[in-house]
Image: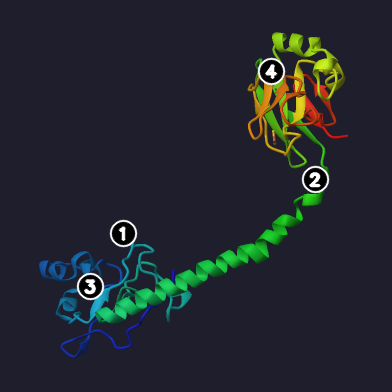
Amino acid sequence: MVVKQLEMNTPLTAKDKPVNSFGDEFLKPQTNGNMVAKHGQYAKYSDPAFTEVDTSKEVVLNTYPDGTREGRIETTTGVPLKEYNASMWDEDFFRKHILKPRQPDEAIERARVMDYALNSVMVGFSILMVRYAILPVWYMGQPTMTMVGQMNIEAEIGQLEDKQCKTVVWRGKPVYVYKRSAKQMRDVEETPMSALKHPETDVARFPNNRLLAVCIAICTHLGCIPIPNEGLFGGFFCPCHGSHYDASGRIRQGPAPLNLEVPPHKWVNDETIYLGN
Ligand code: FES
């Protein structure tokens, strides 16, 4: 991310003369065996004279992309636009972007640590930017927690199988929508009021869409989440202290004092419920 480009200030020289790498500005320079041996894949950016140059103090930093010559080496420095030709070979460019002085190992290590530290600072800075500059803007479009606590929602429940339970989160609370089987319906309808700790008829709890029980899934004892299809009465069971609810969510056995609360709701259609007032 952070590249410190060290530039060379002195021209490459061969035998005390500046190297004119690419005399022919339109033709790709010739390479030969010596050049390839010395410069490998970069030989094509050199000329025969270049093989005489002592590059032991330099290392290859970047590479030119492969492909057609056009656009491979681009220079506009000192070239009037009308004379600009993208296929020009330019040694200054080569020196500036391809070579850099070879550094001693500890300098490389220092540069690496520095690079790491700068990267860490930049990452940290980016996280802070997101936290303090971007998130607040995003939050502006979001409902506040107070609004969430009072919101009514419409939820698509879909077709449920017998004894299938779906959970909808409403005002921060889990709400079970539970499909009772024919046998469960018979049981809850035939249960005498005298058997109930908190007497309520099933039809009073769920006057519409009778097969679907809708209860807030919070145990009325100390607030655990009851488990559907468990317990002695085939409805809901709270394992925290052993409260058994029937398929209507009515407390039948255990320490819970009240039936599971039925949230205010109405059915928009057979598969869509509206929770709230
Ligand atoms: S919290 Fe459910 S039984 Fe105690």
Badge 1 is on which residue?
66
Query: Cα distance, mark 3 to mark 1?
Result: 15 Å
Q: Earlier in the sequence, mark 4 or mark 1?
A: 1
Comparing 145 with 32, the one in front is 145
Task: Name the quarter where the N terminus is drawn.
Answer: bottom left
Task: Name the quarter where the C terminus is drawn.
Answer: top right
Badge 3 is on which residue?
46
Residue kind at label 1, given as amino acid type: Asp
Could you say where residue 133 lies in the image, as x and y percent from the top left? 67, 65
Could you say where residue 74 lies in the image, as x and y percent from the top left? 39, 70
Q: Is residue 142 left or right of residue 241?
A: right
Q: Earlier in the sequence, mark 2 or mark 1?
A: 1
Q: Quadrant of residue 251?
A: top right
Could you say where residue 210 lies in the image, as x and y percent from the top left? 80, 16
Residue kind at label 3, given as amino acid type: Ser
Examine the rendered structure and indicate whether residue 209 appears above or below residue 74. Answer: above
Examine the rendered structure and indicate whether residue 244 appears above or below residue 1. Answer: above
Callout 1: helix, strand or loop?
loop
Q: Is mark 2 within 8 Å of ligand 1?
A: no
Question: Are there few (<14), some (14-19), or many (20+) residues within 10 Å of tag 1?
Answer: few
Q: Is residue 178 left or right of residue 25?
A: right
Q: Nearer the viewer, mark 4 or mark 1?
A: 4
Q: Earlier in the sequence, mark 3 or mark 1?
A: 3
Residue kind at label 4, given as amino acid type: Phe
Badge 4 is on which residue?
233
Query: Cα distance, mark 2 to mark 4?
Result: 32 Å
